[in-house]
Image: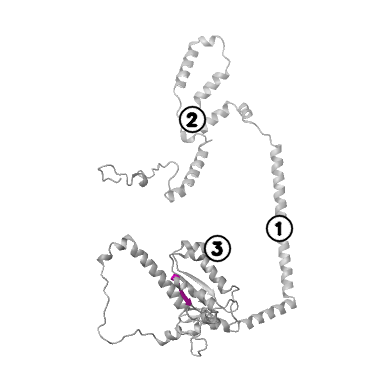
Amino acid sequence: MQSITALAHLRASVMFFIDLSEQCGYSVAEQMSLFHSIKPLFANKPTLLVVSKIDTCTLDDIKPEERQLVEAVREEGIEITQLSSYLDQGVIETRDLACDKLLQQRVDMKLKGHKVSNVLNKLNVAQPGRRDTVDRPAFIPDAVQKRRKYNPEDPDRPRLERDLEAEGGGAGVFNVDLKKKYMLTNDEWKYDIIPEIMDGKNVADFIDADIEEKLAELEREEEKLAAEGLYDSLSEEEDEEEARIKDIARRIRERKKVIAVENRMHKANKAQLTTKQKATIAGADDFVEHLQALGLDPSVAEERAQAVGRKRGRSESRDPAVLLARSSSLAARAVSTQRDRSTMGLRDVRQKAVADKMKAKSTRKMNTMARAGEADRSISTKMPKHLFTGKRGVGSNDRR
């Protein structure tokens, strides 16, 4: 009922099939009753009452009252057609009639519309007239006429796929031959295992016909060698080689374990000093060597360290020489020592050279590929298209 209701919303041609032989399980009266019950859904639609299976039963074979029920629909403007799909009779005619009625209805609807009706009075359809009394009917080839008048009893009729299906075992067993319509230079190529590839040659043409026999001979030879014990000796040699490799790998693993234990023992026995302890142990000489390694003058720092370490008496603060030395020391400290910032965080010049080498190596690939680095200043699109396209002001023709 859902599909029948959907027909009410489709612009289509409706064909209602009935079976006069009643092989469908319903009588003619019941079928016509069903037709009249759903007929209001087909209003304003071209409708056909199709009598099917005329090879079994026709309108002349049924009872007069049943025939009257069927032919009563003609009074309502519904045409009756008959067909037989088994004999292939009336199928094409019924289809053409339904299509023509649907096309005519669509043309009539367009003619009633506003777009066409306004220009109909401006059109003039000319009908050609006869120029003489000679009759010139349409020419239909004999092959087309035979196909239209299909008769399964005619021995000269064309063979259809239906006949091939019946000969091949029927539906579900018959396989359609898809290669029979291949358009090749030679018809013998249609059923080749491998299609033509080039210059009229197939891959199958280069396959040895005795390949199966040769393969069987090789298998027999392999079985003979296996029975003689050839592969047993090879397997023993492979086992010896595999055992030797496993022994070498085992000794390497044992040696690695011994080295790892020695390293842990060495670290456990070695005294670990903190940074504070190292600073306490280091003296003034170590500090001077550190400054010299950094490329700085340690004289001022050395004098300051000696002055701090030396015990000062009460009278030294009033000694002019001491005051002069202190003022000169303050003057020296007022001027900060300039340091090379490129060496900050590095232990000595040697470590700086290593750092410079690592820096050059890390940027080599980037420079080779001409790619931007972290410090390169990049500016994206200064005027993005989505912000400036189509933004014209009043009286302006500048798009950007």
Q: Are the residues flagged by discs 1 and 3 in contact, CB closer than 8 Å?
A: no
Distance from disc 2 to disc 3, alpha carbons, whole Å, reads 103 Å
Residue type at the position of mark 2: Leu
Q: Position of residue 359 (x, y in %)?
A: 48, 43
Which residue lies under the disc numbered 1? 248
Tag 2 secondary structure: loop
Q: Nearer the viewer, mark 2 or mark 3?
A: 3
From the viewer's perspective, tell me whether residue 295 is left or right of residue 216: left
- Residue at the location (26% across, 43% down)? 396
- Above or below, comparing residue 263 to residue 180 in the picture: above
**Stretch in magenta:** 76-81
Q: Residue furthest front?
A: 65
Quadrant housing residue 76: bottom left
Q: Position of residue 145 (x, y in %)?
A: 42, 85
Q: Quadrant of the C terminus?
A: top left
Q: Position of residue 374 (x, y in %)?
A: 45, 42
Which residue lies under the disc numbered 2? 296
Q: Nearer the viewer, mark 1 or mark 2?
A: 1
Between discs 1 and 3, the one toward the N terminus = 3
Residue type at the position of mark 3: Met
Between discs 2 and 3, the one toward the N terminus = 3
- Residue at the location (57% across, 29% down)? 286
Tag 1 secondary structure: helix
- Residue at the location (53% across, 71% down)? 32
Which residue lies under the disc numbered 3? 1
